[in-house]
Amino acid sequence: MANDVKPTRKELMAIEDRIDLSERGHDTLEQKRDGLIMEFMDILDQAQDVRSGLGDDYEEAQETIDMARAIEGDLAVRGAAAALKEHPEITIQSKNIMGVVVPQIESSKVQKGLDERGYGILGTSAQIDEAADAYEELIDSIVLAAEVETAMKKMLNEIETTKRRVNALEFKLLPELHESQEYIEQKLEEQEREEIFRMKKIKNKKEEEEREARDEVSAEESEETDRPEGEVAVTSD
Amino acid sequence: MSTRTNGSGSNYEYVTARVRSRRAKLFDEDDYRKLIRMGPGEIARFMEESEYEEAMNALGARYSGVDLIEHALHRNLANHFDDLLRFAEGRLYDYIARYLRQFDAWNIKTVMRGIYSDAERESVETDLIRAGEFSERRIERLLGAESIEAVIDVLADTMFGDALAGAYGEYEERAVLVPLENAVDRAFYEALIAGLPSEPSRATQLYIDFLEAEIDFRNIENALRLSRSGADVDPAEYYIDGGRLFDEEGIGALVANTDELVSRLRESTYGDDLDAALNELESAEGLSGVERALNRALLEYSRTLSNRYPLSVCPVFAYVLAKMREVDNVRAIARGKEAGLDPETIEEELVMV
């Protein structure tokens, strides 16, 4: 890159401006990266809790439904499940964490009362109630896990992007700019030295010419002084 | 199977003797503990060497695995209950036939649930228990029905016909099976005690006492479920008439106050029998443990009645309940093992007396 730049003072000033801007950008991005990492660590802790809770809820739900199937029969469980008319609703909003837009998922009508599930009491047992309760809790856990894990993934992507930008500035752009700056400075110094040298040369030459002229004049003058009096210089016609 | 009301004398001695011998063949706790530690294949093998041998051999070519076990359990149950009707005469036959119509009610609900949840015919057939009054032809027609309306048409000339036709409007309006299922259950319970003499004989009174106890246990179970859930449901909607413990007006207040309901149950004639169930209610979060304790209490109560009145319908009904429980237990073990549940969890779910 250094060879591509014009070694001019104007270019040097432009590069110095870019270095200044890049250094400020680097500091800001580093702060952003550190902030994102801190936020990410908080979300990671939450995600680990949610993930472990989700696993437990899933196992419990699976166990209760397996037991309900074993005791009540598959059809009774399927019939009870199919009786549900009002399905859970999910609304997605967004919130901003350090410039990263993450989803905020809210669920409603997940936890239902016995009267809202659509199946009767005479034809079913508490096993089915417990399976329904366990699955309702599982859905809530899934919704929470979806929110936290999506936020975590988005934060992770943003951290990666920011890290790449910081590294690009630190290890690519800034070194290149500094190299260019150094190159131009060297070139300019060289040009300056050449200029001085040239000036000195011209000055020496001028001084020599002047000296020669002076010597000539003084030689003529000394010639005239050396000729005897009355002697007329013979000049040929 | 049809209801005989020819007025001939009942043969309690013969039937209860046969029932006692069959009761002795039911699986005991040791058998269940062995079964719990077996895989589905081993359970099938164990059943081949037991009371279920004939059903297992007959169905072995058509089914395999847990399906074979379940079909064999249902067939064996149906054979035993058909035998009861074959043994019984006179009024006793009528009582047993009325009681076994619960399997007709079960089959109707199973077929309706299958249609409602778009289940395959095979899976509906697996869950049917052919131990009721319906003929094979009617069951085939039920299985062939493609809509709830068609099911109601098939049942129009049975004791469930009017009740189902009456509840169909509500089903159409709400698009849930609850009204139809409730109508089927109510029709069954109403028919149990319908048409009995106003001044019952000792035998009839014992029949009524047994059913009242069963209805009471059913109402207790429903009241506890409603009370624990806090759902905004009118308890009268699920109240089964015919018990001794509750009336339609009073059950609402009891459901609203769990403590009062529990103290009422403790003070009732079933207080001692329900002690374990009510203790479970106070300690457990879910109600399935309470339901198991209630089922256990009902089995023990039915056994007490059958011991107290050995020459009555009570030993027969106690056997029916115990046999049904055996089928439920073995099915729970087999399905539980198939689903990979651990033995301790499965054992907790069993009702053993």
Image: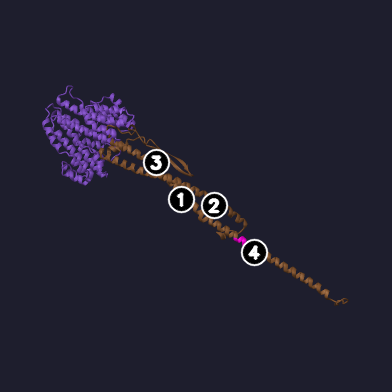
Specify whether residue A188 is painted magenta: yes
Q: Residue at x 51, y 56 (%)?
A: A172
Chain B rendered in what hue?
A: purple
Chain that is coloured brown in the picture: A
Label whose residue precedes the other's in the sequence (2 or 4):
2
Looking at the image, the residue that sits furthest to the right is: A230
Mark 2 belongs to which subunit? A
Marks 1 and 2, the one that precedes in the sequence: 2
> Is residue B41 visible to us here?
yes
Q: Give the position of the N terminus of chain B as an image quadrant.
A: top left
Judging by the rendered image, the residue that carries numbered circle 3 is: A144
Q: Amino acid at mark 3?
A: Leu
Look at the magenta stretch and give its main secondary structure: helix
Mark 3, mark 4: which one is toward the viewer?
4
Q: Which residues are magenta?
A: A186-193
Instruction: Say which residue label 1 marks.
Output: A160
Q: The C terminus of chain B appears in which quarter of the rendering?
A: top left
Q: Earlier in the sequence, mark 4 or mark 1?
A: 1
Which residue is label 4 attached to?
A194
Tell me where residue B75 sits by quadrant: top left
Q: Position of residue B315 (x, y in %)?
A: 15, 32
